[in-house]
Image (cartoon, coloured by chain):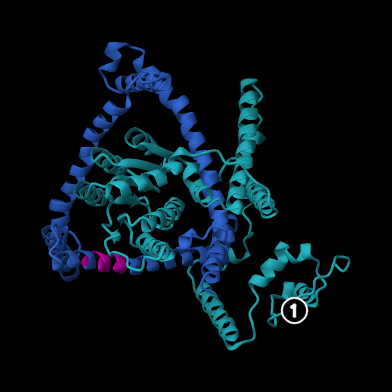
Amino acid sequence: MSGFSLSKTKARRRVVGTRGCAPLHSAYQNGDLGERTKGSFLVRASKAFQVSRSRRGLLFRASLGIWSALLTRQLLDSPALTAADQYAGVFRVERVNALVLSVIFAAAVLWYIAQARRGAKFYIRPIPGLSAVDEAVGRATEMGRPVVFIPGTGDLDEIQTIAGLSILGRVARVTARYATPLRVPVLYPLPMAAAQEMVREAYLDEGVEHLDPETVQYVAGESFSYSARVGGIMLRERPAAAIYMGQFTAESLLIAEVGQSTGAIQIAGTASPDQLPFFIAACDYTLIGEELYAASAYLSGDPKMLGSLKGQDLMKILIAVVVVAGTITVSMGWSPEWLASIFEAK
Amino acid sequence: MKTRLPVFVAFISGALMIIAFFGRGTVVDAVSEEALTWQTIVGGFALLLGAVSIVRVHWQKISTRHTDRYYSVGLLICFAVMAGSGVLFGIGGGTLFDHLFQRIQAPMMSTMFSVLAFFIASAAYRAFRARSVSSAILLLAAIVVMLGRIPMGQYVYHGLPAWADWIMTVPSMAVQRGILIGAALGAASMSLRIMLGIERTYLGRG
């Protein structure tokens, strides 16, 4: 480390890092790290755990310690803890293939994110459905009619719901900018809370302080009641644009057909393959599978997010190569078992 | 702190779930079980948020004499009756709550589900048009599959059921698997972005 160029920065706060990172922190404080090392993952990770010796920092450490002690006590009292299991192996050897593939995937994504941080530009093909979002909101603004956004019918523990909510933030920003009414009926209360926060932040960013309570509303806890309510909203308020992004089940066609009957421009996106045919038949634009997850990266244009898309594309190429190789070997009558076991889930 | 703490919690939670998937044993299983229990408890509290939101939105419609206030009156009455009957008399078999659910709500849910059949027909009528080569292929495949799945199909042509099975098990299944692989990779990539704090839109910040 001592051979790099020095760029000494004064430590603004006294640093107490984790035990493994303390030497690294000392070197960082003393200015013994070069520019490249300062930006390394370890230094940044150790900085994330630094706390000051101020009263707030001590309170934070104390609460963390108390929480850890309570959790440990609770775990020790947990019925899952039996004497026989205490001495079992800690790693599921049968899932080593999943671990290796996960490590390769994470390495690919992190590599391209690092490339993006260094200024590499990545090309992402145009996705018509996402390009049409602004057009749809503009149409609603011109017609003076609201935009209906449905972030799926899954709960907040579904990754599709989070993907849908990330698109909601963008849509809310545009509707706030053009003073277009926005309606976000939600099936579960946790996504409702997240959507309210997201829309409120978007409105505040655009200088709109008042948020209509009807903008984001919890509708029902059951999917058919939800689709009946959404159908009623669409038939009464006649939105000019309807955007469906997230996880859907049987209610997808109910909602999309009602939206189609009102003349709204409809943009849908889901990774549920059972519902894709209904959206493709009833909607003007459809985001298929991974395009939904790419939406937040596509709309933000953030290089780090675009880098992650390149990483997953690399993994897709690897899977395609294995599929082609497996098809050829099986067609030739070889059928090696090790090739099939690479992706076997246990 | 306002941004760092949620990102930190997301990272720790994600890491714990990954360890629980690949790990085995006492502490790992106990941690994942406790995390799922905590999730259920948080969800229960969130249900209160939803109930308050419903009452507030519809009460505001009534108080401001909105055009659709009568729907809101009906909703609040039903909400009060269902919630009150469940709390006061229980939700077991034979109770008022059970009667209301089995005789009113369940038939209405079945009605909504049955409307799907007509919506599928109208969507198919609109979508299956021979506007281009690809849409013509879609139309042909839809005809073969629909006829092949009904008993009358084999009287039209004896090979239709086999053709329908081939379409569903070979090209359709291949496309579905391709979509699933892409979606799974997309979900994994998004999860990694959330864990590393690169994706923060779920915090309400764009």
> What kind of secondary structure does the magenta stretch mostly adopt?
helix
Task: Locate residue A202: give its quadrant.
Answer: bottom left
Q: Position of residue B85 (x, y in %)?
A: 15, 66
Q: Is residue B134 in view from this perspective?
A: yes
Chain letter tied to blue: B
The residue sitting at the right extreme is: A3
Residue of label 1: A10
Please check the rendered image and state whether residue A338 is part of the magenta-colored stretch, yes or no.
no
**Which chain letter goes with mark 1?**
A
Query: Residues in magenta?
Result: B47-55
Residue drawn at x 63%, y 49% as measured from the top left: A109
Residue drawn at x 36%, y 68% as measured from the top left: A209
Label 1, residues with CA under 10 Å away: few <14, some 14-19, many ≥20: few
**Image vertical order of residue B163 relative to residue B58, above or below:** above
Residue drawn at x 17%, y 59% as measured from the top left: B93
Q: Position of residue A229 (x, y in %)?
A: 22, 52
The residue sitting at the front extreme is: A142
**Is residue B177 shown left or right of residue A203?**
right
Task: Locate residue A139: give its quadrant.
Answer: top left
